[in-house]
Amino acid sequence: MIMPIRQFQAQRMRAPRDFQAINNSPICVEIGAGKGKHALLFSQANPDRTLIAIERTREKFLAMQKQHLVEGQHNLTPVHADALPWVVHALFPRQVEDFFILYPNPEPHNPAQRWLNMPFFEYLLSRLKTGGQITLASNIPEYIQEAQQQLIDVWKLPFVKEKIASTSARTHFEVKYLQRDELCQQLIITKPVGYTTRFDDFAPLQGQHVAAE
């Protein structure tokens, strides 16, 4: 079933608490970074790339922050915030090289909140540079199948579906699922040349709240 997609109301988003604006320079963004296993591995393996790792749950964020202080990667910035308002207030159009959404909540009782069913996904695409990619991973075959169908029918985006190797260990969830011999898959979604959204010229709010008309 294809979910109807409304237009996302970006101007209604209030800034996260203690919000800090960022520069308009190329970055990667991980949404729902958990305790930071992937973020720490990625930033260590890619010292020339900047990663911002967003986590909403305080306990998980503090665990990521603590480990980051131990390892000290200068190209990693952990952020404690809800991803939607942070993205709206912080990110510039076509700024992001890669988004990582690894094992998100499958929202079994609220399918409209799944990433590719949300109006917000259009806004996320506007922040992705041409040729940039979104990596969406899940251990739930139905979640991947639905997202794949949305990419074909709604978002009209090219993608590659991959089975994740049993030796992969990017996140704590991934390790647990693979140890259980669960099928873990990912969609690598690419933003092609000429792809447009209704938010391509929408500047970041940077802490300001614009009243809806």
Image (tube, rainbow, N blue to C red):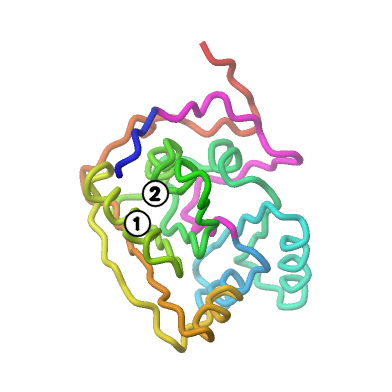
Q: How many circles with numbers are drawn on the protein?
A: 2
Q: Which residue is tagged 2?
A: 128
Q: Tag 2: residue type? A: Leu
- Residue extending furthest toward the front: 109
Give me the residue at 53% from left, 47% from top: 109
Q: Is residue 161 magenta?
A: no
Q: Tag 1: residue type? A: Gly
Q: Which residue is tagged 1?
A: 132
* In the foreground, 97 or 162: 162
Callouts 1 and 2 close, C-beta under 8 Å: yes
Numbered disc 1: secondary structure: strand
Give me the residue at 40% from left, 84% from top: 165
Give me the residue at 64% from left, 30% from top: 14
Q: Is residue 28 magenta?
A: yes
Give the image quarter of residue 76: bottom right
Give the image quarter of residue 12: top right
